[in-house]
Image (cartoon, grey):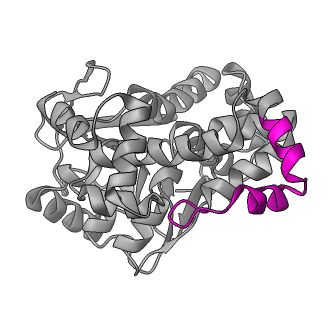
Amino acid sequence: MFRPDPEPLDLEILVVPESTLILVAAVIEPLRAANRILGRKQYRWTISTPDGLPAMTTSGIPIPADRRFAPEASRAPLLVIASYNAASHGTPDLVKRLRQAGRVRPMIGSVEGGAWLLAMAGLLDGHRATTHWEDLDEFASRFPEIDVRPDRFVIDRRRFTSGGASPAIDMMLELIRARQGYPLSLDVAKLFIYDQSRLSEEPQRAPSLGRLISREPRVAAAVRAMEEHIEEPLTIAQVAAAAGVSLRRLQTLFMETLKVTPQAYYQALRLNLARRTLIETRQSVAEIAAACGFNSASVFTRAYRSQYGESPSGTRRRSRAA
């Protein structure tokens, strides 16, 4: 699939409910643009869903389905798109069908949360793979038999995986480059005014961190150190040392660049992760507090209430009701 080939490519795209529109567009639009530039249908795709019904995205806009996903309905490569609560959509039936697809499809890949479904089906065992950068640690812990990488996208034998929307575009441009060459890939990137200079193995980063590197690399280094030490937080002096500046200079740089102290930023970073984990998992409040670097559930609850105006349990009840 990722090799020179003048023949048209058929691709099945399995869209799982609670995917985001931007993920679907990140996969399809580069292929559509390549067809437009070439003046022919070099890339053809079929959209399936687990039940054959439209897949509702997180924005409330459904993605129509051509058919219910059936492993043996096609011999085309399969690409699984999933985002929020991906693992919860991995029903025994869907996992079984994915496992069957692994025996008949020439290649199987995923975008963002789709890696969770492939992993649940055992399709990534013994392979290098990636998923969204926010989930890398949890994904690696859940599936130790997978060589989890922080790369933007990974192609390993008959498996290919990518992080979020931007890495998915990178991966589709790499597909076009591999099959039709750099000129077409560059023309597609130019249509979207998209920078194609990133390498597949370049680590995923939060978008804000990417901008910070060019604006203030010392603050970016501090933020990276914070992100790498959530469960066991560093002291701000240690963060400053990681950024190569004094504690006082770090305070000044944060105020100038982010309009907040490094202490406040670090705590907000940990609390934001806690909030997402509360909404998306069933971990206990105590487990989440420990994973986010709080030495007790009561300390965590006070900080959380101060930040969001409600208790952790209140957030969980409201999100489940919604």
The answer to whether 73 appears left or right of 86 in the picture is left
Q: Is residue 209 magenta?
A: no
Q: 88 above or below 120?
A: above
Indicate the quadrant where residue 64 lies: top left
Residue at figure coordinates x 16%, y 60% from the top left: 97
Q: 231 above or below 208?
A: below
Expressed as whole percent of the image width and height from the top left, the position of residue 148 reads 51, 70
Taking depth in this image into account, of 128 and 4 the one nearest to the observer is: 128
Expressed as whole percent of the image width and height from the top left, the position of residue 162 reads 51, 52
Region of the chain picked out in magenta, as a range:
229-254
Q: Which quadrant holds the C terminus? A: top left
Taking depth in this image into account, of 279 and 239 the one nearest to the observer is: 239
Number of marks present in the image shown: 0
Q: Is residue 22 shown to the viewer in this render? A: yes
Expressed as whole percent of the image width and height from the top left, the position of residue 217 reads 86, 44
Please, what is the dominant secondary structure of the magenta stretch?
helix
Residue at figure coordinates x 36%, y 36% from the top left: 305
Q: Is residue 234 magenta?
A: yes
The answer to whether 303 appears left or right of 58 in the picture is right
Residue at figure coordinates x 53%, y 40% from the top left: 268
